[in-house]
Image: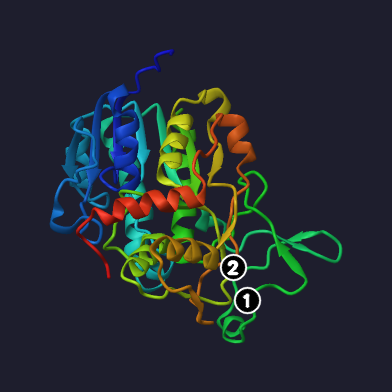
Amino acid sequence: MTQKASLGKVLVTGGAGFIGSALSQLIADRSEGWVVMDSLHPQVHPGGKRPADLHEKAELIVGDVVNPEDWDRVLEHGPFDLVVHLAAETGTAQSLAEASRHSRVNVVGTTEMLDAFTRAGQIPARIVLAGSRAVYGEGRWTHESDGTDFYPGMRTHAQLAASQWDFPGAAPVAARADLNIPTPTSIYGATKLAQENLLTAWAGSHDTTVNILRLQNVYGPGQSLINSYTGIVSLFSQWSEIGKQIPVYEDGVITRDFVYIDDVATAFEAVIDSDPAVTNGQVYDVGNGVGTTIFQIAEIIAEYHGAPAPTVNGAFRDGDVRHAWADISRTTEVLGWSPAWNVRTGVAALQEWIAGQDERVV
């Protein structure tokens, strides 16, 4: 097997989290130094402890991306060849009530990082951003009458209250970065799109390679079990584990693209190892490439535990998009990456992991 090249010195913001820990286990050994900046937020890290899944080589520096002093302290450990920017506030619903918090961390935190690089005179060769499928909003739909595409925009509260879940006479289209116009319908999505634009603008003036991975719904061992905003797969799993019937919103046909954590980590490795001349400035979709309804994922989880079958309750959440899944063909073609896990095997692996954990949100 050909030995892969050294990554040089690496900085990972938010690197003690779910994705950062998984990535560290995959490629930290290839670095000349793996420095993690993380606030150890109690919503994710109860007790502020170093996560067991973080690679032993990682040097953890507790700091907040919105604080210039913390950045100056981190960059004393530089210069860095590669920066993986994972630090972000997540949660579509939570962002509606905490817009300032999401904006501070996701937008101002990114600009503070860039300003810190300038102050320190450290210009990284490559920055990789964990983007989000939330930037697409409702995305692109097709008129069934003539096959033309359009962007319907956000579903209004009145529309949802009337149980009008879809857009009449239209069908959704899988998201693909080079074909879709980003139209975020949540505060979270808007801040993630701002991150993309900020990094692209800054990197273009500093000859820094920037790559963006728009992640679909990431799940798997290592995700927070105490943060209800980190994903329905974890929440549904905990409900089914105790025999609770899973309530499913709308008519159960909300669609998402569930991608397993190991596949996300290998996607990051693929883009990090990619040729800058080919991938600089490019955005790639990372998902399983298959749309799964919320009712289907709930059924799979309930069946695993022998829990009651899910029930559709007709409730809704303002700001939720109806259908979201990715066309990963371009990612596969350019990066040579493809997912190895399907939803059923991934869900089973997550249940096995959860069974061995002590902390729960329910």
What residue is pinned by disc 2? 322
Which amino acid is tagged 2?
Answer: Arg
Vertical relation: 109 (above or below) 313: above
What residue is pinned by disc 1? 165
Which amino acid is tagged 1?
Answer: Trp
> Image quadrant for the N terminus?
top left
Q: Residue at x 41, y 38 (%)?
A: 265
Residue 294 lies left or right of residue 64; in this view the side is: right
* Picture coordinates of residue 337, whole percent (x, y): 54, 33
Residue 266 lies left or right of residue 339; in this view the side is: left
Tell me if mark 1 has few (under 14), some (14-19) or many (20+) residues whose alpha carbon lies within 10 angstroms of its own. some
> Is any atom of residue 108 visible in this view?
no
Tell me if mark 2 has few (under 14), some (14-19) or many (20+) residues whose alpha carbon lies within 10 angstroms of its own. many
Q: Are marks 2 and 1 in contact (CB under 8 Å)?
A: yes
> Is any atom of residue 307 visible in this view?
yes
> Image quadrant for the C terminus?
bottom left
- Give whichever of 99, 139 is nearer the camera: 139
Q: How is the image coloured?
A: rainbow
Residue 75: name its quadrant.
top left
* Picture coordinates of residue 200, whole percent (x, y): 49, 40
Q: Secondary structure at mark 2?
A: loop
- Give whichever of 30, 106 is nearer the camera: 30
Q: Secondary structure at mark 1?
A: loop
Q: Residue furthest right?
A: 146
Residue 10 lies left or right of residue 125; in this view the side is: left
Residue 235 lies left or right of residue 284; in this view the side is: left
Q: Residue at x 17, y 39 (%)?
A: 73
* Picture coordinates of residue 55, whole percent (x, y): 23, 35
* Picture coordinates of residue 295, whole percent (x, y): 53, 68
Q: Residue furthest front?
A: 306
